Image (spheres, rainbow, N blue to C red):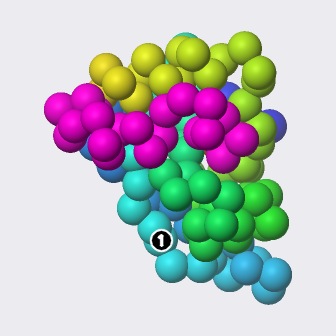
C-alpha cells in the first residue's frame, strides 16, 4: 500500500466534492457518485449521509476498492474502516468544511449515526 502525498491530501481534502466509483465483480468501475470528503490528519474520509442502505455505500463496502477523483487527482483506492479514536476529528472536519450548508444537511454526516458508515480512503 502506498500513502497519500502531501499534494494529494491537500487537493482532495480541499475539494468541495469527491467522486467515488466502486468496483463491480468483473473489476469494471460502477458509475461515479458525488459526495463530500474530509481530511483528518493525513487521512481522507467519506460518510454515507443516509445510512448503510445507501446503494453507493453498500457497493463500496462489498467491493472494498474503487477509484476516487477530486481536486484534479484521480486515484485507485481501497475502502477501509476508520480507527475508533478518529471520529471526533472527522466530525470537526465536516463541521469546519460544510457547516455553511446548514445543520440539517451536515447533521446527516456527523455524530453517532455516522460512525458505522465512515469509510477511510487508502491509495493503492
Q: Is residue 9 magenta?
A: no
Task: Answer above or below: position of 97 versus 74.
Answer: above
* Residue 106 image position (x, y, % from top left): 35, 38
Residue 124 visible in the snapshot: no
Q: Give the quadrant of residue 84.
A: top right
Q: How many marks?
A: 1
Task: Answer above or below: position of 62 versus 13.
Answer: below
* Quadrant, the N terminus: top right
* Residue 16 image position (x, y, % from top left): 28, 42
Foreground residue among 104 and 58:
104
Residue 46 relative to residue 23: left or right: left
Highlighted range, magenta: 98-120
* Residue 8 image position (x, y, % from top left): 46, 33
Task: Answer above or below: position of 93 versus 54.
Answer: above
Foreground residue among 71 and 103:
103
Circle 1 is placed at which residue position? 32
Q: Give the quadrant of residue 51.
A: bottom right
Residue 1 visible in the snapshot: yes
- In the image as oriented, which residue stretches furthest toward the left? 100
Q: Give the quadrant of residue 26.
A: bottom right
Give SS at disc 1. Answer: loop
- In the image as oriented, which residue stretches furthest toward the bottom? 26
Residue 76 relative to residue 70: left or right: right
The secondary structure that most of the magenta stretch takes on is helix
* Residue 53 image position (x, y, % from top left): 65, 66
Q: Is residue 108 magenta?
A: yes
Q: How many C-alpha atoms fall within 10 Å of the one at disc 1: few (<14), some, or many (≥20)?
A: some
- Which residue corresponds to the image point at 59% horizontal and 39% vertical from the top-left? 114
Amino acid at each position: 500500500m502506498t500513502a497519500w502525498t502531501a499534494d494529494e491530501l491537500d487537493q482532495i481534502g480541499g475539494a468541495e466534492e469527491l467522486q467515488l466509483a466502486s468496483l463491480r465483480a468483473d473489476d469494471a468501475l460502477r458509475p461515479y457518485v458525488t459526495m463530500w470528503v474530509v481530511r483528518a490528519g493525513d487521512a481522507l474520509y467519506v460518510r454515507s449521509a443516509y445510512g448503510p442502505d445507501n446503494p453507493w455505500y453498500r457497493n463500496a463496502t462489498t467491493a472494498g476498492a474503487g477509484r476516487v477523483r477530486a481536486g484534479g487527482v484521480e486515484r485507485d483506492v481501497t475502502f477501509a474502516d476508520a480507527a475508533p479514536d478518529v471520529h471526533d476529528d472527522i466530525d470537526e472536519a465536516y463541521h469546519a468544511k460544510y457547516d455553511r450548508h446548514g445543520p440539517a444537511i451536515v447533521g446527516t454526516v456527523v455524530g453517532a449515526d455516522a460512525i458505522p458508515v465512515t469509510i477511510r480512503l487508502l491509495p493503492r
